[in-house]
Image (cartoon, helix red, strand yellow):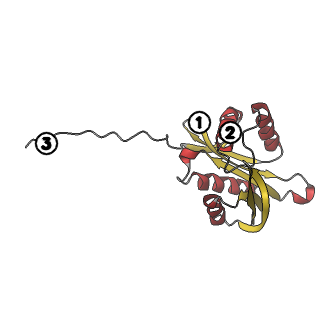
């Protein structure tokens, strides 16, 4: 019996993440798009949609002027995630910063959050950040596990902190001290 050659082409998946880079002006529209996609999932962020592009642009550029660390993950030229660390403005709190991050759905579970978080925290520490803090929904187990792996500890629970579609959600206040 002759063998028949079969060809198998795997189903196309998302393009691989090629780089994690500091955010630049060329990434602002892509960052805005990724922020909007994740916000509209209604499960991870305090906002349910991204603000207007002009407001997002102003927020990012002002944060960078004030010493923030902000990286984006790129798949080709598409922004598929971000991580930022924004120092507090009070003189007595400049050693502290607030962490924010997000990964679009099709790129979750591939270690991208870990890569971005490592790069962001390292840059923050090089700039003198000794306290990084965040709030995370108490039902977001994958994010909580990620933060714990990087040394974040739960400092408290803020009950009924968010209301989405009439349902209250608690958040955890987490911090990492260096």
Residue 113 appears left or right of 127:
left
The residue under the point 85% across, 53% down is: 88
Contact between marks 2 and 1 (CB within 8 A): the answer is no
Q: What residue is shown with label 2?
A: 36
Task: Give how far across and how far down residue 170 sits, in percent.
Answer: 74, 60
Q: What residue is shown with label 3?
A: 3
Foreground disc of the pair 2, 1: 2
Contact between marks 2 and 3 (CB within 8 A): the answer is no
Camera-nearest residue between 128 and 56: 56
Foreground disc of the pair 3, 1: 3
Q: What residue is shown with label 1?
A: 78
The residue under the point 39% across, 40% down is: 11
Camera-nearest residue between 100 and 36: 36
Q: Decide: is 59 above or below 123.
A: above
Q: Decide: is 33 above or below 134.
A: above
Quadrant position of the C terminus in the picture? bottom right
Residue 31 found in image quarter: top right
Number of other residues with Cα within 10 Å of mark 1, as a class: few under 14, some 14 to 19, many 20 or more: some
Contact between marks 3 and 1 (CB within 8 A): the answer is no
What's the CA distance linking mark 2 and mark 3?
A: 51 Å
């Amino acid at each position: 019996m002759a063998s028949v050659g079969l060809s198998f082409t795997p189903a196309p998946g998302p393009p691989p993440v090629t780089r994690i880079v500091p955010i630049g002006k060329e990434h602002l529209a892509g960052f805005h798009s990724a922020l909007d996609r994740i916000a509209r999932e209604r499960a991870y962020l305090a906002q349910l949609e991204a603000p207007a592009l002009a407001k997002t642009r102003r927020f990012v550029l002002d944060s960078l002027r004030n010493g923030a660390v902000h990286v984006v993950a790129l798949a080709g030229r598409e922004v598929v995630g971000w991580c930022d660390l924004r120092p507090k403005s009070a003189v007595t709190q400049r050693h502290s910063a607030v962490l924010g991050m997000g990964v679009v759905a099709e790129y979750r579970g591939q270690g991208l959050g870990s890569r971005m978080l490592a790069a962001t925290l390292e840059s923050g520490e090089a700039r003198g950040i000794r306290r990084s803090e965040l709030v995370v929904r108490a039902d977001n187990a994958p994010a909580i596990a990620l933060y714990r792996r990087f040394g974040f500890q739960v400092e408290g629970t803020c009950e009924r902190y968010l209301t989405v579609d009439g349902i209250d959600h608690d958040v955890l206040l987490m911090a990492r001290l260096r």
